[in-house]
Structures are given as C-alpha cells and as structure tokens.
Amino acid sequence: MTAQVPEKLLFEGEELDLCNEPLELFIEKTPMTVRFMSPHTALWRGYVGTWEIEEDRLYLKSLDATIEGEKGYEEVGMERVFPDYPNGLFAHWFTGELRCPQGALVKYVHGGFGSVYEKDLFFKVKKGVVVDRRVVVNGIAPQGAPKDYHIAALTTIPKE
C-alpha cells in the first residue's frame, strides 16, 4: 500500500498533519448519500478532512472529496457530503486517539500512515471531546544512520 495523504488538524493556530481517519467511524455506522472514490493511490479513502480542536471539542470543518457522480468522478466539499452542516460538524461519534507527526522524517514507511517522525502529538478523544494529550519523542536519525534506525522515549505534556 502507498503512503497516504494525511488529514489536517487545526490546533492552537497551527495546521498539523493528522494520521488518522476520524470520519471512517461515522461512515461505517451511518448510511451515506455519496460514495467516496479514490482519485489516486495516495488517497484510497477518497477525501481529505480538515479537523479542528476548539475548546477541547473535535470538529470536522471542511472536506475535499472525490465521489462517484452521474458522469464519473466529481470533486465536492462539505456542503455536498453534509448539506445540513456546511460550516462544520461536531465529531460526537469519534472515540479514540488522534496522531499528529511532528519534526523531521526519521523512517519512511511505504504504506498507510506508518512513517516515523521525530515526535508524535497524540490526542485522546472520547465522544468528540479531548480528554488528554501527550507527546512521544521518537528520536532524531543521525546522519548516515541505517534506514531502519529509530528510538522511542515517552514524554507527557500535561493538559492545561
């Protein structure tokens, strides 16, 4: 499998890559009026969501999607997929952990979201509400290190 295009997460004024698919749980449980289509091998899910954590709540703010239209593939946004929520949707269905890689690439993995970066920022979410966050320091690959080089150390950032 090809490495995948990440989702986006807006947090404290920054746009971060998000290596999860929070919308997937919604799609699994809810009949959809559209069928997402893959425009290329780096985007098998057929969409890129922009998410935001605002006052410890997770929202889907926008969506850039490819769907199966009457005349083939069609590029659409939030207003087509979620017409009742064109300005955003509270992610009440999502419980799990969100991963935002940060820093330089330490190890490339040609599949999914498996690549390792210097750090990962994790958000623990319960029914759309952020209940904790932490940072995992994966290390820095020294110059000339073998491709499979990586270390892992855990650092916790207290939630304010």
Image (cartoon, rainbow, N blue to C red):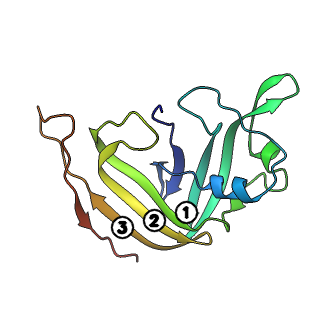
Task: Determine if residue 90 is in view.
Answer: yes
Circles 1 and 2, Cβ within 8 Å, touching? The answer is yes
Circle 3 or circle 1, nearest the eye: 3
Q: Residue placed farthest to the top in the image?
A: 71
SS at mark 3 in the image: strand
Disc 2 residue type (three-letter): Phe
In screen coordinates, is 87 left or right of 3? right
- Which of marks 1 and 3 precedes in the sequence? 1
Q: Quadrant of residue 135?
A: bottom left
- Disc 3 versus disc 2: distance between alpha carbons? 7 Å
Circles 3 and 2, Cβ within 8 Å, touching? The answer is no
Q: Position of residue 144 (x, y in %)?
A: 11, 31
Q: Position of residue 84 (x, y in %)?
A: 84, 56
Q: Is residue 54 above or below residue 152?
A: below
Task: Determine if residue 88 is in view.
Answer: no
Circle 1 or circle 2, nearest the eye: 2
Q: Residues within 10 Å of mark 3 (few under 14, many from 20)?
A: some
Residue at 79 percent across and 56 percent down: it is 85
SS at mark 1 in the image: strand
Residue marked by disc 1 = 53
Residue at 60 percent across and 48 percent down: it is 50
- Disc 1 versus disc 2: distance between alpha carbons? 10 Å
Q: Is residue 63 above or below residue 30?
A: above
Residue marked by disc 2 = 123
Disc 3 residue type (three-letter): Arg
- Which of marks 2 and 3 precedes in the sequence? 2
Q: Which mark is residue 103?
A: none
In screen coordinates, is 123 left or right of 52? left
Residue marked by disc 3 = 134
